[in-house]
Amino acid sequence: MIETVTLFLAEAGPSWSEQISLFFKEAGVFMFLLALTSVAALTAILFKFLSLTQNRVIPEDLAEKVERFEETVANGGAEPVLAEFERGQSALARLCSIAVGQRGRPQSEIAEAVQATARQEIVNLQAGMTVIDVVVAVAPLLGLLGTASGLVVIFSGFEADANRLTIALGIGRALKTTIVGLAIAVPSIIAHGYFQRRIDTLAVRLEVLLTKLAHVCERTARPDNGSPVLSPKG
């Protein structure tokens, strides 16, 4: 029975783990560099998925409150919304806190005060994109470099009686790094395009909401005693 199992395993060939180990060994050091590149890409993509969630940037409930802020101020119920702004749990809340702190001033001054913080928030939204950019550029180049180095070794060993099958197998192994490099770069390009589009959409949405809020704050009185309570001018 044991001999039968041993014979079956021998005929079945190497296991998946052995095949992966052989794959890396045949491709050389460039495959390990590609493995590190893939880990960096995966980490950056996961980070962007988490950092660009709706609640971290523009929570829907807070966006609705900003949309109805003028009505809320007119009804005298702005205090809970102001408290949510002050907590600063999202990019929208932090920018709104800056805007309401400039209430009573011209809209241009309010917009100018918000701009610096808005730029910082956009920079935060862009965090991690540089890593994906680098992966997109480096992964195919590492793949080509690995292939080129493999081909150099193969062709340098040419002899008059060289085995064509051996040469063909060697070239196939050398091309593995190019395949892996492209396999890393293509998903990274797709992810980069998706994240960049989402960042642009969120930035435009923030601009629209803050413009509306600045318009309300311009027509809102600023209490002399520093109270956070808002009231319409006049």
Image (tube, rainbow, N blue to C red):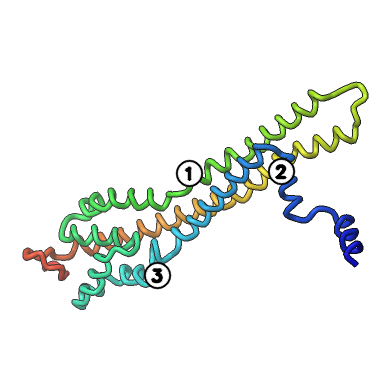
Which callout, 3 or 2, points to the residue nearer the camera?
Answer: 2
Q: Amino acid at mark 3?
A: Glu
Callout 2: SS:
helix
Q: Residue furthest top?
A: 160
Q: Where is residue 20 shown, x and y percent of the image?
A: 72, 50
Q: Nearer the viewer, residue 199 or 145?
A: 145
Question: In which quadrant of the rendered view does residue 157 lie?
Answer: top right
Earlier sequence position, callout 1 versus callout 2: 1
Relative horizontal placement of residue 108, taking residue 26 as reference (left or right) = left
User: Which residue is label 3 attached to?
Assistant: 60
- Check disc 3 and report its element: helix, strand or loop: helix
Of helix, strand and loop, which one carries label 1?
helix
Pointer 2 residue: 179
Query: 3 or 164: nearer the eye?
Result: 3
Q: CA distance from mark 1 to mark 3?
A: 28 Å
N-terminal label among 1 and 3: 3
**Badge 1 vs badge 2, beta-carbon distance below 8 Å:** no
Label drawn at residue 130: 1
Sequence-first tag of 3 and 2: 3
Please give the name of the residue rendered at 39% of the width and 61% of the height, measured from the top-left corner.
57
User: Please, what is the three-letter code of the amino acid marked with disc 2?
Assistant: Ile
Q: Is residue 231 visible?
A: no
Residue 33 occupies which quadrant of the picture? Answer: top right
